[in-house]
């Protein structure tokens, strides 16, 4: 069973997460959900990672789920400006700090995100080249100013990237094609699906997707 944890961001937001504890983990993973989902959307993947001795932390991004309290009052992502959406990067930074306190190092942390969470993962990975792998389910070129297009060209040659998108999810499908064509330092793996599933709903489209991600994270 996961353990509920919480920590503070640099701007005073209380982030609540589920910590899937592994004794002496091989790797760590940070799981960043899509809108309007919560940390619970990652359960199938988190459990599979756990079975492979990979510890994972699934967080509620600010304004979602249980992460609604801040020094400035209650938060609701539905009311966020673009700048407030972009401030979710502080949630990612604080989560990485929390993982490091649990023994992780950047070179042992995989970033896995869905939709805007995919963009957040890509931006952090592009700025921290020790991160070995980023998995982006249904990213967008730009979600509310969280820009994956700029991040993609900054990915380092020794970083691995996995994209996944469904054909009927036009924006994300076109995005992964565009990103894959513009990323000159690394050749990402791209999984393309039929249907219109978005983000973690892709797990229902491809029953093998969870294990593909687990294998990628475990191999780096």
Image (cartoon, rainbow, N blue to C red):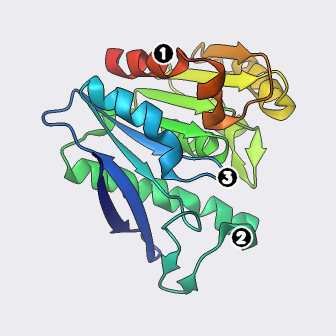
Camera-near label (1 vs 2) is: 1
Q: Position of residue 169 (x, y in %)?
A: 82, 30
Foreground pick, 38 / 204: 204
Q: Are marks 2 and 3 in contact (CB under 8 Å)?
A: no
User: CA separation, marks 1 and 2?
Assistant: 34 Å
Classed neighbour count for the residue bearing mark 1: other residues with Cα under 10 Å, few (<14), some (14–19), many (≥20): few
Number of labels in the image equals 3
Compared with residue 74, is residue 60 higher up or lower down, i.e. above or below?
A: above
Query: Which residue in the protein does label 3 denote?
Result: 35
Quadrant in which residue 22 is drawn: top left
Side of 118 relative to 22 (left or right): right
Would residue 138 be seen by someone viewing this image from the given angle? yes
Query: Which residue in the protein does label 2 denote?
Result: 80
Side of 25 relative to 126 (left or right): left
Residue shown at 74%/38% (left/top)?
A: 140
Quarter of the picture holding the C terminus: top left
Q: Position of residue 1 (x, y in %)?
A: 27, 45
Q: Position of residue 207 (x, y in %)?
A: 56, 17
Mark 2, secondary structure of its residue: loop
Quick one: label 2 or label 3, which is nearer the N terminus?
3
Side of 71 relative to 147 (left or right): left
Mark 1, secondary structure of its residue: helix
Residue shown at 34%/65% (left/top)?
A: 6
Residue shown at 31%/49% (left/top)?
A: 19
Compared with residue 17, is residue 159 higher up or lower down, i.e. above or below?
A: above
Q: Are marks 1 and 2 in contact (CB under 8 Å)?
A: no
User: CA separation, marks 2 and 3?
Assistant: 12 Å
Q: Position of residue 155 (x, y in %)?
A: 55, 29
Compared with residue 162, is residue 112 higher up or lower down, i.e. above or below?
A: below
Compared with residue 186, is residue 74 higher up or lower down, i.e. above or below?
A: below
Query: Which residue in the protein does label 1 denote?
Result: 212
Quick one: label 1 or label 2, which is nearer the N terminus?
2
């Amino acid at each position: 069973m996961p353990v509920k944890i919480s920590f503070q961001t640099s701007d005073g937001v209380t982030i609540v997460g589920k910590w899937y504890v592994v004794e002496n983990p091989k790797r760590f993973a940070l799981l960043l959900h899509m809108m309007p989902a919560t940390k619970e959307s990652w359960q199938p993947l988190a459990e599979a990672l756990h079975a492979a001795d990979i510890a994972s932390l699934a967080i509620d991004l600010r304004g979602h789920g249980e992460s609604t309290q801040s020094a400035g009052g209650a938060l609701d992502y539905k009311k966020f400006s673009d700048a407030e959406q972009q401030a979710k990067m502080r949630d990612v930074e604080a989560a990485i700090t929390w993982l490091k306190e649990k023994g992780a190092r950047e070179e042992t942390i995989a970033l896995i995100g869905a939709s805007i969470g995919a963009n957040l993962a890509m931006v952090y990975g592009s700025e921290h080249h020790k991160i070995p792998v980023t998995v982006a389910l249904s990213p967008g070129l730009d979600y509310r100013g969280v820009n994956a297009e700029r991040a993609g060209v900054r990915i380092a040659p020794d970083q691995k990237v996995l994209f996944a998108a469904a054909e009927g999810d036009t924006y994300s499908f076109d995005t992964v094609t565009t990103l894959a064509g513009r990323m000159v330092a690394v050749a990402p793996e791209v999984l393309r699906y039929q249907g219109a599933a978005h983000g973690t709903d892709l797990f229902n489209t491809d029953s093998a997707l969870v294990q593909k991600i687990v294998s990628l994270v475990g191999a780096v």
